[in-house]
Amino acid sequence: MQASPLGPDSLTRWPIYLLLFVLVLFPLLTAPVAYGREAVNLSAQTNPLCTSPTKPTITTNGPTTLCAGGSVLLTATEGRSYKWSTGATTRSITVSQSGIYSVEVVDVNGCTGKSDDLEVSVATKLNRPKIEYTDPLIVCQQGSLKLSIPEQEGASYVWKKDGIPVSSESNEFTATEAGVYTVELSNFCGLVTSSNRVEFKILEPIASFEVQAAGSLVFCTGGSVTLSVPEYKDVTYAWFRNGNPIAGNTRTLVAKEAGTYTAQITNLCGTYSSSSNGQRVELLNLPVKPVAQNVTGCTKSALTLTASGGSPGMYRWYTSASGGTPVGNEAVFTTPVLSESTSYYVAITNGECESERVRVQANINTKPAAPEIKASGALEFCEGGSVKLSVTANSNLSYTWLRNGQEISGGANTLDVNQSGEYALTVQNDCGSTLSSNKIKVNVKPAPAAPQVQDMSVCGPGSLTLTARGGANGEYRWYDNATTATALAGATDATFTTPALQNSRTYYVSLVRNGCESSRVPVQALVFPVPQAVASVQDIEIQSGESTRLLGSGGANYSWSPALGLDNPTSATPTATPEQTTRYTLTVKNEEGCQDTTSVVVTVRQLLVIPNAFSPNGDGVNDTWEIENIEYFPDAKVEIYNRWGTLVYERTNYRGEWNGTYRNAPLPVSTYFYLITIPGKSKFTGYLNIVN
């Protein structure tokens, strides 16, 4: 096709085409194409509204630095659509992880703007650290201690000495001053303190010191003096007497022995001894303590107390065991008038030291209080029982017991009673004062007579019924032990059936009547062994007329039955000559009368009676060949042969039924040969004649 040149008509039509393009096509080409509710800007460069799009912003609902587990809501400027750096397309997103976040927003004019980056930081919760160290905690005069804790991301550190901050540089710190060190960690999540405190000590040499005494260094044996040295921290103490180590590791020592005492104090800087010559302790010997005896007198009298072992004027009498002022200084001291017993104490002095004090008792026999008898148990009991009567003991009194008004033996404050009666007591002191007690009535109930019993026995394991006499059912008590307190449950009758017993044992029975129980009587439940009857021979077989010996064992007495055919049926080994097969039963008894049985069969083999002829002629007499006693040999085999050796008859368990036929036909009159075989025993042969 040739292109036609533009003619005048074409030129005249061009403004029309241009106008059509401007009015119709250009807006279509430059307008955004809508898909659903959003629009894609096909020619944003030419959209006069997007020459400088609005830049979106991101707002938050809280801090952008978070603690682990927290979150923050990021919200973009409102627009038609959103695209976050995370890929989300919603206006708001919730953030819980560290990162740089931004958003692109398409506004209502279809223009796209991108926000500035927003950083979100997530801090880890701090762990409470433990301060670690390897250097010594105690140094002498100078030194350092390197402290450290594990580093934790995002944390700041504050080291403190005695609670005052000293460093905030890092997780490590070197201490050069004495004190107690801790560390604090903090971040956005909070603050934690170290789990431990480390004390760094810088010690100095111990200054010169002396042993000090808190009292006199010269004292009597039994006394003491307290020695001391200055108090220091982080030291050890050691004490010496006459240059030898002694017990004691504190700054004070109670010295009770004579000698020169010194001390040492040791710390990290060294060991330092007390200056001068220490403290010398001297002991004075005590006099030997005196000997004195107690004295007894009556009410409202003055008693004379006497001591020995010292010289005149060396005695010291006191009214207390320690301390106080002496009330006498001679060997003999007379008390004031006394109404009650009083303790005095006497010692001997040598002018410097006083002996141990000895107690001396001035006993006054006051009028005794009326004694009250008390019982340790029930006052009514069964014969064989007892009750203890008693009053409060007093060594200054004598006692007299009475039963039914009559004096009985017993001069103590207690009395064991096992008889009925009314009991009383009188008491008297050395001054003649006498008082009577209350009266106690004791009733002893008679116990029933013990029951009569008889031992029982059983052959072999089993139960037995034991029987007692002398009481009524309900009054009996059966026991399985001679001393146990509890009777067998439900066993209150005259008879008692034991459980199955494997061995003999003893039971006990008593009678209970009116609340009192008789003595227990033993009852033997005897379990005797059962003998084992033994026949030492197996079942045997003999020929008729022969004899055999039966062998029995296992007991003390023997009995064979039936006695027929035995020479002595009560012998353990009788001779048996039975006429026919017999089962002999052996009964064996032991000395206790228990028995057992066994048996043995003696089979009597009868002799065969074999006729040598028979007449099978049908007359009813000798029509068959009858062999006497063959029924005793059921396994016997009978064979008949003719003169030419032909087997004409054969049968096992023969019963006399052959009638002289062969193949259902009568055999001719002739002589034949028989063979009778008894397996394992014998064979019988001979000639047999068939006659008319």
Image: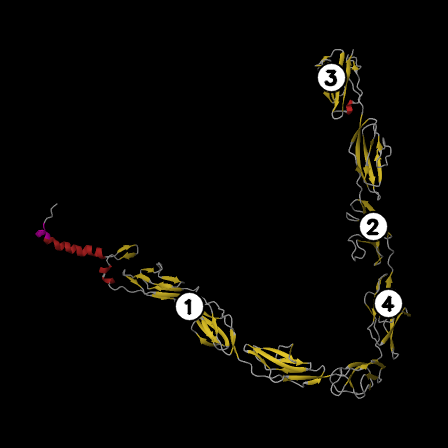
- The amino acid on which the numbered mark 1 sits, given as a three-letter code, is Gly
| Pointer 3 with pointer 1, Cβ within 8 A | no
- The amino acid on which the numbered mark 4 sits, given as a three-letter code, is Lys
Kindly indicate the quadrant of the structure image that contains residue 578. Answer: top right
Residue 209 lies, in percent from the top left, at 59, 83
Q: Who comes first in sequence, dot 2 or dot 1?
A: 1
How far apart, in angstroms, are the residues tagged by discs 3 and 1? Answer: 129 Å
Between circles 3 and 1, the one closer to the viewer is 3
User: Helix or strand or loop: what does disc 2 sit on?
Assistant: strand
| Residue for badge 1 | 154
- Would you say 73 lies left or right of 426 here? left
The extreme left residue here reads: 8
| Residue for badge 2 | 524
| Residue for badge 4 | 441
Q: Who comes first in sequence, dot 2 or dot 3?
A: 2
Q: Is residue 290 magenta?
A: no
How far apart, in angstroms, are the residues tagged by discs 1 and 4? Answer: 97 Å
Residue 218 appearing in the image:
yes
Q: Who comes first in sequence, dot 4 or dot 2?
A: 4
Please tell me which residue is depicted at 8% across the width and 51% down the height of the picture. 7
Q: Who comes first in sequence, dot 1 or dot 4?
A: 1
Please tell me which residue is depicted at 66% across the width and 84% down the height of the picture. 280
In the image, which residues are magenta?
Answer: 5-10
| Residue for badge 3 | 640
The extreme front residue here reads: 243
How far apart, in angstroms, are the residues tagged by discs 2 and 1? Answer: 95 Å
